[in-house]
Image (cartoon, helix red, strand yellow):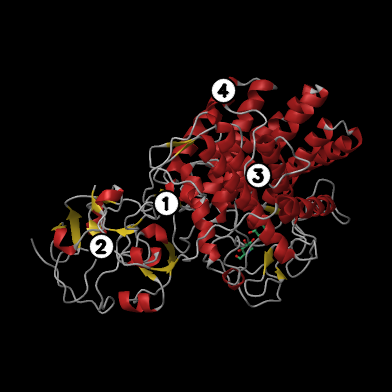
């Protein structure tokens, strides 16, 4: 076995190697290429050699990860009810306002600083999805006056979109294919092409559009029986879906770019994929029900399956979250787009829904990062945080006023509430929750400690469901706190002062508040059977008790929060996997671990481990690795496992990993 004693100016390491579990640290680069372990730690950051090509020096996640106390339900309900009415009015004001043509949805009622007086495909489809839901509710309530108003607005938007799809635009100049005009993201409010430079094409538009059209058609046909209108939209719907079929596998690295919903990066995007998939499945239903076309049905099914395979490859097991982009250059932190994609594509198939363990872990994790990220969150550490797009974001909303950089987004904060309401409802309906390595510590955060492989049912499930619902309310409480007495929903808040920044009256912000309210109403109806007078009781009762809710709990021996770590072994246990001169890239290409040692320490930098280690250790076998008062962060910093024990159970909380 050869030892590497490489002296590198870039990595002048003075301290013993400190290994954090990757999932306790963000993947947001906190250093520079020349950062050393000591300068990294001196800056208060985490140091972990990266095995995925990412940075080694990371912003730590906040140590205060205590769950906020759920606010009083009736206080939230009262605020939400009033904010909802205001938001519906504002959202409707954004539909074909004066100076625009019929069917336009302006992104914001703002013509300068920033100028959002345009029709975006994405914002338009998300906004009209709300109108489709309002239509369905009006029909259900027997309110034919409003049902007609909403129906007219839906049909006018559908006609406007069809008009856009019949004209050329700059996306066509990029791809050379006229049919690709449906990938254009943004249009002038007279319906003409926006020809300024922009991140185009954006491939989420067609999927979102078809999903929204189908939501409307489903309600419309069941209310009116008018399948002729539904069938008349077949070529418009097929054009959007053909675009997805043609473009979904695009590598986005050369040739046709694929910009994300943030209009910044050309890459394969999880958000784009999940809404493409939803659009295809909506189309599959359309071409089964109203226009029969089995060729299209099988093609949409096949492509949606391929998209599922592509999305699965976005899971970053090292970091413990889903990468929004496959090419993570320059943006590595968890993205609110995962949360948004999950709720925007939510449907009865529960695909990558808020209860999916990878999605849940990603979203929970993402919010923890933001908890420590903005001054306004740090000052309110015991409350749910305001959340933004992603940690590296610098876009301040372009309002030309503030210089404090990117702030939290209102639509993301409202989206977190919706996400947790949906999670609570889905788990309750499922009647049980399976504990996996990905959701174990999330469930623990939500008050239920359980072993990986076990199933949470009974009163423990009710606890979990209640706490998930309470988390949703906690996000709305935070949102209402910063909104104060004004009901205006901008794009962002200032990260330091909480003042509003970015686009005023952002239509999508209103849409997000409205859908959060709908998700909350649904949750209350299903969980307590009472949507009008929500109670504040600690335990929700089921209207109808799912079968498995009657069983007693299968809980729970406390178990550690830590995950198995492959490369986290003592230096003396490293088995050389390289030769002198082996680079990090060569090492990892051979499937080995790479972890440079401090100067003065000899041992292989590229190595295999005799055994994979795990934190899954019976309480009675735990070997203490801390002292009284050791925190989770200190424990992780020492490369140990962290697993708090229930009161009354004695044993170390910080303990050594063992061979797996
Ligand atoms: C406008 C885009 O819509 C926004 O998402 C982006 O961050 C900024 N341009 C800066 O590139
Ligand atoms: C910027 C956002 O990044 C983008 O998603 C949105 O479409 C536009 N603003 C318009 O609201």
Q: CA distance from mark 3 to mark 2?
A: 43 Å
Foreground label between 2 and 1: 1
Residue depicted at 54% across the width and 32% down the height:
431
Whether label 1 lies within 8 Å of ligand 2 gets the answer no
Q: What residue is disc 4 on?
A: 295
Q: Label 1, secondary structure: give it.
A: loop
Q: Label 4, secondary structure: give it.
A: helix
Q: Label 3, secondary structure: give it.
A: helix
Verify CB contact (< 8 Å) between mark 2 and mark 1: no
Q: Where, quadrant-wise, is the N terminus in this rendering?
A: bottom left
Q: Nearer the viewer, residue 493 or 547?
A: 547
The mark that comes first in sequence, 4 or 3, is 3
Q: CA distance from mark 1 to mark 3?
A: 55 Å
Name of the residue lying farthest toward the left: 1
Q: Quadrant of ligand 2?
A: bottom right
Name of the residue lying farthest toward the front: 648
Q: What residue is disc 2 on?
A: 584
Residue depicted at 74% across the width and 64% down the height:
483
* 17 vs 216: above or below: below
Q: What residue is disc 3 on?
A: 182
Verify CB contact (< 8 Å) between mark 3 and mark 2: no
* 578 vs 517: above or below: below
Q: Nearer the viewer, residue 578 or 566?
A: 566
């Amino acid at each position: 076995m050869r030892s590497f004693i490489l002296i590198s100016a870039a990595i002048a390491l003075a301290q013993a190697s400190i290994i954090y579990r990757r999932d306790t640290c963000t993947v947001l680069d906190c250093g520079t290429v020349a950062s050393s372990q000591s300068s990294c730690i001196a800056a208060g950051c985490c140091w972990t050699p990266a095995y995925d090509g990412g940075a080694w020096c990371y912003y730590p996640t906040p140590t205060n990860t205590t769950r906020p106390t759920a606010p009083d339900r009736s206080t939230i309900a009262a605020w939400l009810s009033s904010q909802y009415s205001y938001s519906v009015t504002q959202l409707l004001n954004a539909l074909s306002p004066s100076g625009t043509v019929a069917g336009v949805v302006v992104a914001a009622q703002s013509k300068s600083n920033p100028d959002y007086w345009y029709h975006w495909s994405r914002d338009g489809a998300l906004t009209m999805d709300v109108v489709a839901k309002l239509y369905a509710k009006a029909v259900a309530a027997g309110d034919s006056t409003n049902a007609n108003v909403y129906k007219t607005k839906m049909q006018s938007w559908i006609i406007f979109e069809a008009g856009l799809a019949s004209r050329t635009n700059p996306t066509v100049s990029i791809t050379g294919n006229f049919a690709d005009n449906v990938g254009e993201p943004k249009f002038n409010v007279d319906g003409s092409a926006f020809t300024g430079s922009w991140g185009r094409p954006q491939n989420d538009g067609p999927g979102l559009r078809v999903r929204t059209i189908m939501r409307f058609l489903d309600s419309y046909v069941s209310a009116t029986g008018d399948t002729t209108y539904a069938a008349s939209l077949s070529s418009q719907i097929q054009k959007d879906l053909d675009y997805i079929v043609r473009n979904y596998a695009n590598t986005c690295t050369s040739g046709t770019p694929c910009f994300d919903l943030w209009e910044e990066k050309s890459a394969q995007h999880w958000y784009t994929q999940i809404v493409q998939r939803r659009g295809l499945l909506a189309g599959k239903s359309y071409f089964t029900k109203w226009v029969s076309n089995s060729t299209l049905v099988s093609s949409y099914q096949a492509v949606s399956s391929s998209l599922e395979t592509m999305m699965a490859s976005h899971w970053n097991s090292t970091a413990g979250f889903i990468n929004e982009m496959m090419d993570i250059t320059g943006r590595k932190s968890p993205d609110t787009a995962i949360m948004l994609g999950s709720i925007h594509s939510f449907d009865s198939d529960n695909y990558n829904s808020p209860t999916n363990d990878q999605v849940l872990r990603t979203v929970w994790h993402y919010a923890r990062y933001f908890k420590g990220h903005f001054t306004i969150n740090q000052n309110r550490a015991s409350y749910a945080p305001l959340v933004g797009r992603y940690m590296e974001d610098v876009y301040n909303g372009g309002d030309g006023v503030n210089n404090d950089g990117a702030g939290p987004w209102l639509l993301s904060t409202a989206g977190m509430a919706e996400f947790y309401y949906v999670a609570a409802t889905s788990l309750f309906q499922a009647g049980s929750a399976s504990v996996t390595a990905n959701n174990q510590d999330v469930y623990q955060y939500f008050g239920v400690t359980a072993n990986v492989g076990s199933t949470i049912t009974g009163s423990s499930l009710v606890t979990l469901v209640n706490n998930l619902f309470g988390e949703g309310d906690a996000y709305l409480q935070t949102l209402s706190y910063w909104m104060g007495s004004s009901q205006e929903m901008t794009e962002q808040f200032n990260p330091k002062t909480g003042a509003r920044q970015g686009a005023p009256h952002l239509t999508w912000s209103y849409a997000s508040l409205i859908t959060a309210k709908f998700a909350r109403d649904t949750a209350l109806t299903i969980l307590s059977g009472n949507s009008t007078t929500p109670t504040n009781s600690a335990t929700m009762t089921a209207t109808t008790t799912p079968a498995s809710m009657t069983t007693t709990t299968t809980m729970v021996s406390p178990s550690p929060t830590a995950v198995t770590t492959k490369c986290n072994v003592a230096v003396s246990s490293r088995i050389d996997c390289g030769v002198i001169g082996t680079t990090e890239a060569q090492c990892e290409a051979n499937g080995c671990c790479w972890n440079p040692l401090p100067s003065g320490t000899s041992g292989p930098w590229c190595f295999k481990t005799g055994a994979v280690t795990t934190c899954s250790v019976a309480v009675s076998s735990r070997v203490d690795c801390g002292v009284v008062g050791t925190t989770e962060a200190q424990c992780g910093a020492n490369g140990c496992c962290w697993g708090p024990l229930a009161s009354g159970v004695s044993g170390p909380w910080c303990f050594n990993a063992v061979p797996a």
